[in-house]
Amino acid sequence: MRLLGKIALWIVAVLFTAAVIFVVATNYQIRATETVAYDANAPGRYITFGGHRWHYLTKGDVPNDPTGAPVLLLHGFILSGHESFLTFKDKIGEGRGVIAPDYLGYGHSERVLEPGEHYEISHTTQAIAAMLDELNVQQVDLLGHSYGGVIAAQFALDYPQRVRRIVFLSSAPYVDISGTKMYETGLGIGRAMAWHIISGPLSFLGNSCKASTRCTWAPYALIKDSTDAMRAAMYTNFHSPTFAALAGRLPEISAPSPVIIGDRDFIVPLAHAERMTKALQNAKLAVIEGGRHMPYVGKFDETYKAVADFLQPST
């Protein structure tokens, strides 16, 4: 028994040491790699809202979109922001005006390290409305992917007169936050875990880049303070009453709203998309066979057709 006890203690000591090394090494990696200014090589323009700089990109003649409402692309919870939509933006933008913002803390927008109102979804919709005002755009068609669908829903609630149509892509506001506490852990532990999930070599971003022959997303993982900004954004959203109330307010949205989901989505279950479709006033469900959480990456043609059938000028 004494021998077994010693072996158990030895195993615990080894695991503890490995965990400490993991945390220390990861935090060192964050400091060593996140060194680039957020506005370096920014391709679009900036608006200052709420005391912070928000970046957004446009394509085509936005104020004079031939259908009367340009497409507003709302990206998911991914560090690269608008860049994650790049090839899709170019295709959707054939004959349309397109607006692609970066939310605060994403893409080329400013990194803010503290949780707060600036990361609230309602504050984000206000910033987007300010962008539209600057562009002299009164009404838009929304395409929201993942977390972008949450922003799209909140925008439709806050500014119903400015929304003509909404496409919810791989999105549903039914979020289980039970596992998010790990990102709030101190002593550098939560920070290390967040980095590996958000932008580290094992992250969705890292794996997507490894699988792609053209990966322009990786540089965003080098922007200074990205991990801390993402943690602040997550903390704000997962403790936000506005975010928590959104699911119950979906029946208030009357704009035509297709819900598109991949049947292999590992983040948003098909059941959530079905539930969302029933909750919205004017929605229909389209399932992309073989599509994952970013179906426009692996199933581009199928996803584009599902979106274009609703957003193209001929519809």
Image (tube, helix red, strand yellow):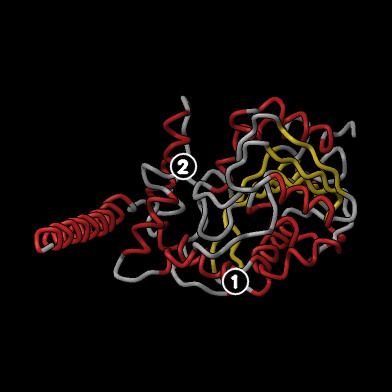
Measure how far apart labels 2 and 1 are at the Cα level.
29 Å
Q: Position of residue 178 (x, y in %)?
A: 53, 65
Q: Position of residue 134 (x, y in %)?
A: 71, 58
State the mark number for residue 231.
none
Picture quadrant where residue 4 is located: bottom left
Identify the residue position indicated by label 2 in the image.
205
**Tags 2 and 1 in contact by the CB under 8 Å rule?**
no
Q: Residue sitting at 41 percent across and 57 percent down? A: 194
Establish if 202 lies above or below 306: below
Q: Quadrant of the N terminus?
A: bottom left
Is residue 315 rendered to the left or right of residue 308?
Answer: right
Picture quadrant where residue 132 is located: bottom right
Front tag of 2 and 1 = 2
- Secondary structure type for disc 1: loop
Q: What is the total number of numbered labels drawn onto the structure image?
A: 2
Q: Residue sitting at 55 percent across and 48 percent down? A: 81
Q: Neighbour class for label 2 at 10 Å: few (<14), some, many (≥20)?
A: many
Q: Specify the amino acid type for callout 2.
A: Leu
Identify the residue position indicated by label 1 in the image.
50
Q: Position of residue 224 (x, y in %)?
A: 37, 56
Is residue 294 rendered to the left or right of residue 9?
Answer: right
- Secondary structure type for disc 2: helix
Towards the viewer: 60 or 176: 176
Q: Neighbour class for label 1 at 10 Å: few (<14), some, many (≥20)?
A: few
Q: Quadrant of the C terminus?
A: top right
Q: Specify the amino acid type for callout 1.
A: Gly
Q: Position of residue 202 (x, y in %)?
A: 38, 43
Towards the viewer: 211 or 33: 211
Establish if 112 lies above or below 31: below
Who comes first in sequence, dot 2 or dot 1? 1
Establish if 302 lies above or below 173: above
Q: Residue sitting at 66 percent across and 44 percent down? A: 58
